[in-house]
Amino acid sequence: MIEWTSVFAEALPYGAFLDRYATPSQRTRWDAMHGRFALDEAHRTILAGFTRRMPVICMAGAWCGDCVNQCPVFDLFAQASPAIDLRFLDRDARPDVRAELSVNGGHRVPVVVFLSEDGYEVARFGDRTLSAYRRMASEMLGPACPTGLVPPPTEALAAVFGDWLDQFERAQLILRLSPRLRMTHGD
Protein backbone atom coordinates (compact mmCIF):
# COMPACT_ATOMS: atom_id res chain seq x y z
CA MET A 1 0.00 0.00 0.00
CA ILE A 2 1.29 3.44 -0.91
CA GLU A 3 1.89 5.96 1.88
CA TRP A 4 0.57 9.04 0.07
CA THR A 5 1.86 11.52 2.64
CA SER A 6 5.45 10.52 1.93
CA VAL A 7 4.86 10.60 -1.83
CA PHE A 8 3.41 14.09 -1.50
CA ALA A 9 6.44 15.19 0.53
CA GLU A 10 8.76 14.01 -2.27
CA ALA A 11 6.76 15.61 -5.06
CA LEU A 12 7.56 19.09 -6.39
CA PRO A 13 5.57 22.26 -7.01
CA TYR A 14 4.73 22.94 -10.67
CA GLY A 15 7.64 25.26 -11.48
CA ALA A 16 10.20 23.18 -9.59
CA PHE A 17 9.01 20.04 -11.37
CA LEU A 18 9.53 21.67 -14.76
CA ASP A 19 12.86 23.16 -13.69
CA ARG A 20 14.09 19.72 -12.73
CA TYR A 21 12.64 17.53 -15.48
CA ALA A 22 11.86 19.61 -18.57
CA THR A 23 14.31 20.36 -21.32
CA PRO A 24 14.27 23.96 -22.59
CA SER A 25 12.09 22.99 -25.57
CA GLN A 26 9.69 21.05 -23.36
CA ARG A 27 9.49 23.98 -20.94
CA THR A 28 8.63 26.28 -23.86
CA ARG A 29 5.69 24.03 -24.79
CA TRP A 30 4.47 23.85 -21.18
CA ASP A 31 4.70 27.64 -20.80
CA ALA A 32 2.90 28.24 -24.10
CA MET A 33 0.07 25.89 -23.12
CA HIS A 34 -0.20 27.50 -19.67
CA GLY A 35 -0.80 30.80 -21.44
CA ARG A 36 -3.68 29.35 -23.46
CA PHE A 37 -5.79 28.66 -20.36
CA ALA A 38 -7.65 31.24 -18.32
CA LEU A 39 -10.17 31.13 -15.52
CA ASP A 40 -13.46 32.91 -16.04
CA GLU A 41 -15.64 34.22 -13.22
CA ALA A 42 -17.62 30.97 -12.92
CA HIS A 43 -14.39 28.97 -12.57
CA ARG A 44 -13.06 31.41 -9.97
CA THR A 45 -16.30 31.13 -7.99
CA ILE A 46 -16.11 27.34 -7.91
CA LEU A 47 -12.46 27.34 -6.85
CA ALA A 48 -13.02 30.10 -4.27
CA GLY A 49 -15.59 27.83 -2.64
CA PHE A 50 -12.97 25.20 -1.83
CA THR A 51 -12.43 25.33 1.92
CA ARG A 52 -10.87 21.99 2.79
CA ARG A 53 -7.12 21.66 2.30
CA MET A 54 -6.72 19.25 -0.59
CA PRO A 55 -3.24 17.92 -1.30
CA VAL A 56 -3.07 16.84 -4.94
CA ILE A 57 -0.34 14.69 -6.46
CA CYS A 58 0.02 14.66 -10.22
CA MET A 59 2.20 11.92 -11.65
CA ALA A 60 3.47 13.33 -14.93
CA GLY A 61 6.27 13.43 -17.44
CA ALA A 62 7.73 16.65 -18.78
CA TRP A 63 8.14 14.88 -22.14
CA CYS A 64 4.46 13.82 -22.32
CA GLY A 65 2.14 15.60 -24.75
CA ASP A 66 -0.93 14.76 -22.69
CA CYS A 67 0.77 16.33 -19.66
CA VAL A 68 1.67 19.44 -21.66
CA ASN A 69 -1.98 19.77 -22.69
CA GLN A 70 -3.49 19.19 -19.23
CA CYS A 71 -1.15 19.87 -16.30
CA PRO A 72 -1.02 23.67 -16.72
CA VAL A 73 -4.74 23.61 -15.90
CA PHE A 74 -3.99 22.12 -12.50
CA ASP A 75 -1.51 24.91 -11.79
CA LEU A 76 -4.18 27.52 -12.61
CA PHE A 77 -6.61 25.79 -10.24
CA ALA A 78 -3.98 25.76 -7.47
CA GLN A 79 -3.18 29.44 -8.04
CA ALA A 80 -6.89 30.29 -7.73
CA SER A 81 -7.58 28.20 -4.62
CA PRO A 82 -5.41 28.23 -1.51
CA ALA A 83 -7.11 24.96 -0.54
CA ILE A 84 -5.36 23.11 -3.38
CA ASP A 85 -1.82 22.07 -2.48
CA LEU A 86 -0.53 20.77 -5.82
CA ARG A 87 2.63 18.73 -6.32
CA PHE A 88 4.09 16.87 -9.28
CA LEU A 89 5.92 13.55 -9.29
CA ASP A 90 7.90 12.38 -12.29
CA ARG A 91 6.46 9.12 -13.61
CA ASP A 92 9.80 7.33 -13.32
CA ALA A 93 10.87 8.70 -9.91
CA ARG A 94 8.92 6.13 -7.89
CA PRO A 95 8.31 2.79 -9.66
CA ASP A 96 5.98 1.72 -6.83
CA VAL A 97 3.74 4.75 -7.41
CA ARG A 98 3.92 4.28 -11.18
CA ALA A 99 2.73 0.67 -10.76
CA GLU A 100 -0.03 1.68 -8.35
CA LEU A 101 -1.33 4.34 -10.73
CA SER A 102 -1.19 2.30 -13.92
CA VAL A 103 -4.17 2.73 -16.22
CA ASN A 104 -5.33 -0.30 -18.18
CA GLY A 105 -2.02 -2.00 -17.44
CA GLY A 106 0.03 0.93 -18.78
CA HIS A 107 2.16 3.63 -17.20
CA ARG A 108 0.11 6.54 -18.49
CA VAL A 109 0.30 10.13 -17.42
CA PRO A 110 -0.98 12.44 -16.16
CA VAL A 111 -2.68 10.70 -13.26
CA VAL A 112 -3.92 12.79 -10.36
CA VAL A 113 -4.45 11.60 -6.80
CA PHE A 114 -6.60 13.77 -4.55
CA LEU A 115 -5.87 13.47 -0.82
CA SER A 116 -7.53 14.56 2.39
CA GLU A 117 -5.64 16.88 4.69
CA ASP A 118 -4.66 13.86 6.79
CA GLY A 119 -3.33 11.80 3.90
CA TYR A 120 -6.22 9.57 2.88
CA GLU A 121 -6.81 9.00 -0.82
CA VAL A 122 -10.05 10.69 -1.82
CA ALA A 123 -10.05 10.03 -5.56
CA ARG A 124 -7.79 9.49 -8.54
CA PHE A 125 -8.25 10.40 -12.15
CA GLY A 126 -6.22 10.22 -15.34
CA ASP A 127 -4.80 9.90 -18.06
CA ARG A 128 -7.11 11.72 -20.43
CA THR A 129 -10.55 13.16 -19.84
CA LEU A 130 -13.70 11.87 -21.50
CA SER A 131 -13.83 14.82 -23.89
CA ALA A 132 -10.23 14.13 -24.95
CA TYR A 133 -11.04 10.47 -25.62
CA ARG A 134 -14.16 11.41 -27.56
CA ARG A 135 -12.15 13.81 -29.72
CA MET A 136 -9.43 11.23 -30.32
CA ALA A 137 -11.97 8.57 -31.25
CA SER A 138 -13.74 10.85 -33.72
CA GLU A 139 -10.49 12.05 -35.29
CA MET A 140 -8.34 8.97 -35.35
CA LEU A 141 -10.23 5.78 -34.56
CA GLY A 142 -6.87 4.17 -33.94
CA PRO A 143 -3.78 4.36 -31.76
CA ALA A 144 -2.10 7.73 -31.47
CA CYS A 145 0.20 9.53 -29.09
CA PRO A 146 -0.13 13.31 -28.84
CA THR A 147 3.30 14.92 -28.79
CA GLY A 148 2.42 18.29 -27.34
CA LEU A 149 4.05 19.89 -30.40
CA VAL A 150 0.71 20.82 -31.95
CA PRO A 151 -1.78 21.91 -29.31
CA PRO A 152 -5.41 20.86 -29.55
CA PRO A 153 -7.96 23.38 -30.81
CA THR A 154 -9.32 25.93 -28.33
CA GLU A 155 -12.71 24.19 -27.98
CA ALA A 156 -10.99 20.88 -27.16
CA LEU A 157 -8.87 22.61 -24.51
CA ALA A 158 -11.99 24.18 -23.01
CA ALA A 159 -13.66 20.77 -22.77
CA VAL A 160 -10.63 19.23 -21.07
CA PHE A 161 -10.44 22.24 -18.73
CA GLY A 162 -14.08 21.69 -17.73
CA ASP A 163 -13.61 17.94 -17.29
CA TRP A 164 -10.69 18.50 -14.93
CA LEU A 165 -12.45 21.25 -12.99
CA ASP A 166 -15.30 18.78 -12.41
CA GLN A 167 -12.82 16.26 -10.97
CA PHE A 168 -11.23 18.83 -8.65
CA GLU A 169 -14.67 20.00 -7.51
CA ARG A 170 -15.85 16.40 -7.00
CA ALA A 171 -12.85 15.67 -4.74
CA GLN A 172 -13.42 18.90 -2.78
CA LEU A 173 -17.10 18.03 -2.24
CA ILE A 174 -16.13 14.55 -1.01
CA LEU A 175 -13.88 16.28 1.53
CA ARG A 176 -16.51 18.86 2.51
CA LEU A 177 -19.17 16.20 3.03
CA SER A 178 -16.93 13.70 4.84
CA PRO A 179 -18.46 13.00 8.27
CA ARG A 180 -14.95 12.44 9.67
CA LEU A 181 -13.68 15.81 8.42
CA ARG A 182 -16.89 17.63 9.31
CA MET A 183 -16.47 16.40 12.87
CA THR A 184 -12.81 17.46 12.88
CA HIS A 185 -13.68 20.97 11.63
CA GLY A 186 -16.96 21.35 13.51
CA ASP A 187 -18.99 22.01 10.40
Image: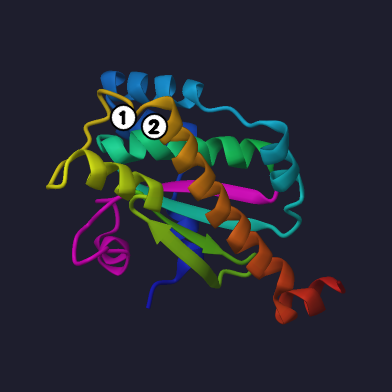
Amino acid type indicated by mark 2: Leu
Amino acid type indicated by mark 1: Ala
Q: Quadrant of the N terminus?
A: bottom left
Report whether 57 appears left or right of 49. left
Report whether 58 appears left or right of 182. left
> Residue 14: image x %, image y %?
48, 37
> Residue 89: image x %, image y %?
38, 49
Between 125 and 12, the one lying in front of the other is 125
Between 178 and 153, the one lying in front of the other is 153
In this rendering, the count of numbered labels is 2
> Residue 4: image x %, image y %?
47, 66
Q: Which residue is mark 1?
A: 22
Start-end of magenta stretch: 83-109
Residue 116 versus residue 43 in the image, above or below? below
Residue 57 magenta-highlighted: no
Q: Verify CB contact (< 8 Å) between mark 1 and mark 2.
A: yes
The residue at the point 22 percent across, 32 percent down is 147
Asked whether residue 79 appears in the rendered view, the answer is: yes
Residue furthest out toward the right: 186
Q: Label for residue 18?
A: 2
CA distance separating discs 1 and 2: 5 Å
